């Protein structure tokens, strides 16, 4: 009996794959439910595929938000320019030993993928020394919760393709 209780108790540590990304290697799923749920966004699934097996590398996550967190996230999904303004107003933290903060170029654009709403974002150092990082988010409200798919990667089109593909499978109404 103790073995059954232990097995059931550890189910939260078994990673749930993200629908819409290939199952198995080279994609890896992480068991996040017990790690990050601290009365905030509840992670449902997270998967990543890193170079050289995947080029470009991608990270894909599915979150469930409620209450104030859901309302705040919905406001950003509806108007991503507010996120861009916020990020531009805060200088980046300087690398250790550097005196100047890192200036970041931020661009956002709405993604209209009915019935989902969301945005794409790019972040790059203003000095151009590093390539931009790309992200995208699509969300759908269902009753008391907002479910959101987030994708981060090195290639803009790969990120936007992945967020649409995963949202179609994970957020179906």
Image: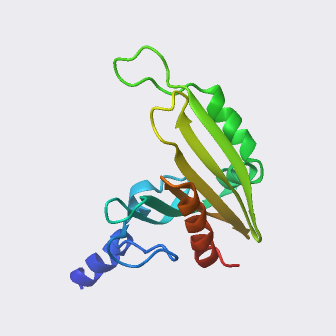
Q: Is residue 103 visible?
A: yes
Q: Is residue 144 visible?
A: no
Q: Nearer the viewer, residue 132 or 14?
A: 132
Residue 167 % position (x, y): 62, 71
- Which image quarter is the N terminus in? bottom left
Instruction: Please state the total of marks drawn on the protein image.
Output: 0
Residue 65 % position (x, y): 62, 59
Residue 86 % position (x, y): 67, 34
Q: Residue at x 72, y 47 (%)?
A: 80
Instruction: Single out the residue that lies furthest toward the front.
Output: 128
Note whether 88 is above or below 134 in the view shown: above
- Which image quarter is the C terminus in? bottom right
Q: Residue at x 32, y 74 (%)?
A: 25
Residue 153 % position (x, y): 48, 54
Image-quadrant location for residue 111:
bottom right
Q: Residue at x 34, y 77 (%)?
A: 24
Note whether 134 is above or below 32 in the view shown: above
With 149 as the anchor, is 67 left or right in this view?
A: right
Q: Nearer the viewer, residue 5 or 32?
A: 32
Note whether 5 is above or below 57 in the view shown: below
With 110 as the anchor, is 123 left or right in this view?
A: left
Q: Residue at x 28, y 79 (%)?
A: 7
């Amino acid at each position: 009996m103790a073995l059954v209780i232990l097995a059931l108790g550890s189910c939260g540590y078994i990673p749930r794959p993200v629908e819409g990304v290939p199952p198995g290697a080279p994609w890896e799923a992480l068991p996040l439910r017990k790690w990050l749920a601290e009365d905030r966004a509840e992670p449902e699934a997270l998967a990543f595929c890193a170079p050289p097996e995947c080029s470009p590398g991608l990270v894909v996550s599915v979150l469930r938000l409620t209450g104030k967190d859901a309302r705040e996230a919905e406001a950003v999904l509806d108007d991503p320019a507010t996120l861009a303004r916020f990020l531009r107003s805060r200088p980046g933290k300087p690398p250790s030993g550097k005196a100047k903060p890192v200036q970041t170029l931020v661009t956002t654009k709405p993604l209209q993928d009915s019935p989902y709403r969301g945005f794409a974002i790019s972040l790059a150092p203003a000095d151009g020394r590093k390539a931009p990082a790309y992200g995208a988010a699509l969300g759908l409200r269902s009753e008391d919760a907002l479910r959101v798919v987030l994708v981060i990667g090195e290639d803009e089109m790969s990120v936007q393709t992945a967020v649409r593909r995963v949202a179609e499978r994970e957020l179906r109404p």
